[in-house]
Amino acid sequence: MKRFILGIFYLLLTLPCVLQAQKLEPKEVTVLVNKYKNDIRGPYKDIRWFCTDGSIRPPKDPCPDNIGTGVQHARYKDEVVALGKSNHIFLGQILAYTDMESLWDVENDHSRLKQYQLDKYLRSVDNGWINQKGQFYRGAIQSEDEQAWGIEFYKWLLAKDEILRNEYFLVRQSLKDIPHNGDDNVAQKMRSESKVISDLYLPFMDLRTKIHSQPEESDIQKVIKFKKTHSSKLPADIALKIDALVTTMKEFHKPVDISALAQMAPLTKGTPLGNSISGFAASSSELNSPKLLVEQASQLLYDIREGLLEEERPMARLQLLDVSLKLEEIVFKSSPEYQPQNLKDLLHKICYLGMAVTGSGYLEQWEWNQLAPGLTNYDVPEQSLGELTEVLNRARAAVEWSAAMTKANYDAIVKQYVAFEPLAAGFIDDKIRGSVSLHLGQSVGELGNMISMESQLANKVMDVQNQSTIRGLNPGYAFGELVVVGGSSDDIEVSSDKIYVFQRPPSDLKPVAGIATVAEGNMVSHVQLLARNLGIPNAALSDENLQALKKYDGTRVFYAVSNKGNVILKPENQMSQEELALFTVKERREERIEVPVGQIRLDENNVLNMRSVDADDSGKLCGPKAANLGQLKKMFPDKVVEGLVIPFGIFRTHMDQPMPDQEGSYWQFLTNMFQEANRMLDSGITENEVENYQLRQLEILRAAIKKMELLDSFVDQLENGFQEVLGGDLGNVPVFLRSDTNMEDLKEFTGAGLNLTIFNSVDKTKILEGIKDVWASPYTERSFKWRQKYLLNPENVYPSILVIPSVDVDYSGVLITKGISSGTDKDLTVAFSRGAGGAVDGQAAEQYLIKDSGGYTLLAPARERFYNVLPETGGTEKKIATFQDRVLKERNISEIRDLARTIRERVPKETNSDYQGAFDVELGFKDNKLWLFQIRPFVENKKALGSTYLESITPKIDLEKRISLSKKL
């Protein structure tokens, strides 16, 4: 009782400290990490006995028999505990000291589990990491207790069908790190040891690359030979590390005892899966070729995943998953030995590696079902070049999707750790290189090289290896400095005359000369639409390609993407005369467009019912968003919400008010700024200096607009509009405020995503403040730079605002009434993500090519881990997405097909438009009901599409050419 009272007293004393715990900055966490590296106890404070009755005893006072056995391990330092509470960062986690639900950590996307895995990686590549000295702190962690905890954890976790169905990849990955059967992750240990050696001794880098990318048993002799060759130069400690690596490599390359597999899953004896495992184990002597071994092991790996939920016993499930891991190891080791002799063998290998990747969780089963028809047709005498190209596209998709699965699951935690421990950046790459995806990628690369030779459609990207993983997205050409961004792009300040290679482009990208990305997001995001509209060359590439380009960072290069998607990237000194001529100085005005402003009506000062506007009012009363949505409301009344329009005139009336601390009005301030800029240019001041002046002035203007007093008459009209049109009081109806300028959604210029949209605002004050924020948004640096670069009269921008009630859609996205990837006008392209605002901000969205001839092709599954929901109280909340089910259902695709047909037929007629191009439509589904939110022209760059140079680098391909599958490689 006394101990209980003391505990309560201590809790009350420390509670204020806990409640006031402030989040540490990354640099402060770095200080802690470095401190623990040099602490003989690492992140731990002391060692104690933890008894079953909840009591804690000193290390020399074990738990009495009458209480029951306890466990002995370390306690965390107080600051480690505080870091977990303030930052949700958990260093040096001891499993036996952790509650199971806390480690699974559902509310934080399983952050603690992922941190445990990342901690293990960091220890392997940094000599113990925070336990560099603490790893010798005897008794801190008891391996047998950790393993016992692991078994109990999986008994608890694997009893839940939903977890296995939704989080199969993560559960299976965790088995590689959480002790539960005495095995170590030897493959990761081998990669880590080779990395440590190459970091300390650079000449080892080539061998490290070989071990990481294509490990083979012959590498052992190469490492031994390396040590002998460099013996006179090698420090003693590195020589010892090489010896340790050789030992690990021998352990890794030791043949798997296939006959013992059945013994790993005794609980499954007599079950369908148990019989399959026993049959595979019994036939070990007959699996005498790598080809047969890869085929049979991959099939069983897939079958275990498919049938796992039919086995209901948690321990039996655990045994099946352990067999699954062992089968992946068999495929991983056997794949380099399977050397296809002809094209048929290569297609066979790709098919079964795709099956292994699915069985290992890197692809969802429904995704494999979409890919399989294109990958299983290898048992025929010949195929056309067109058919083989489609096989390549499907196989390359499997590689990209599997890598994206790893990134989607671990990217957030890696970003958090990289901020204070840069070594964490290698974790995702290590995960991918340790998987069967590695060998699938290499086989797909071989197929790509063969098809490139047959079609003469080859990339020419510096001296990068495996160029078949590079593919063009948007045609165009550029010349400038190459900037390779290996990490986060969030804080990168881009320049309009440089070419950028990103892991993932920022969603608010400013003008650039060219881009290439590892994670393309999706082909209809705002960034991609801008690139396509403005002729900015854009390509997708692999992480391996990005790493290979790092050595060219800072080099001036020529970059081109053809209309067929082949890519050229070469140094300036290798440019041809034709390529140099593309960049001779021209009058910029020839390349820009002028937005007509003669018909703008600034006399309309009333808040309008969206039903009263239509396409004819675009650029006159309001921008095209409101005008076109009003048009859609007439055409599809039950698929479009009600809405209000704040026209150009109300904006201009407010801008004509006196501007505080300035002479004249807001509008006069803006006009004076442009006049002064022209005077500066005429006097010979550089464009950069003039632009910097304008940006400083616009910053002053934006700040002033945000503080502007709204006219009472306007607020009164807005309140009446909410009641009469939106059906509730201002302050009670959640709405979107969408910027709608006269300089976007045009036939020649898209302007997609350049200005502000405010999501799901409810509070009256926030809505009124939001209106001013939207008015100010065309004057942000990003919006101004895009307009300045491509429009002749960017000063004549007028924002209107579309106010529409929020629809908390289940999933949303974009429809383009054209097949972007196929290039046919009759097909459709769609991209959808879960929640609101889907696809437009570059999310890794689910994408389809819906074919006019019938059917569809999955271009990419969703790989966005978080999505937006719109609570009735306003704002947005993030929810966690899983990928086991597709986003769009069959009935949704059918309805989208019908919608596109209607849009093509009716919109030109009902708007009396001569526009013949495709449309870009934003839409969503709520309880399978379709809602339309926007329609605008889909704008492509005519200059790029019609470029003589781009046409010249696009070979003419005979897709009907027949190729024998017995063709030797």
Image: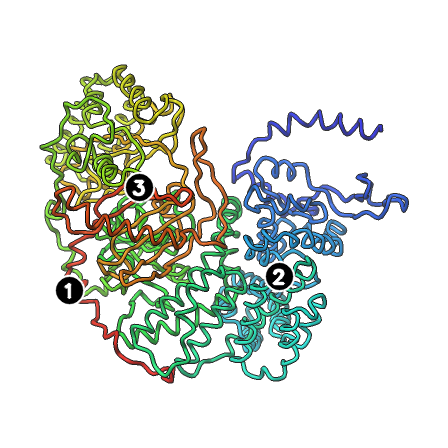
Q: Quadrant of the C terminus?
A: bottom left
Indicate the amino acid at tag 3: Leu
Q: Is residue 284 left or right of residue 694?
A: right
Would residue 272 be seen by someone viewing this image from the given angle? yes
Disc 2 packing (10 Å; few <14; some 14–19; many ≥20): few
Indicate the amino acid at tag 1: Gln
Disc 3 packing (10 Å; few <14; some 14–19; many ≥20): many
Q: Quadrant of residue 950?
A: bottom left
Q: Is residue 712 left or right of residue 413?
A: left
Looking at marks 3 and 1 on the same chain, the residue that comes earlier in the sequence is marked by 1
Q: In this view, does 681 lie above or below 386?
A: above
**Mark 2, secondary structure of its residue:** helix
Residue 539: x, y in percent?
A: 31, 58
Q: Which mark is residue 577?
A: 1
Q: In which quarter of the image is the N terminus?
A: top right
Residue 34: x, y in percent?
A: 59, 45
**Mark 1, secondary structure of its residue:** helix
Q: Mark 3 points at which residue?
A: 932
User: Outermost residue toward the right?
Assistant: 66
Q: In this view, does 780 lie above or below 574?
A: above
Q: Which mark is residue 725?
A: none
Would residue 551 be seen by someone viewing this image from the given angle? no
Residue 934: x, y in percent?
A: 28, 41
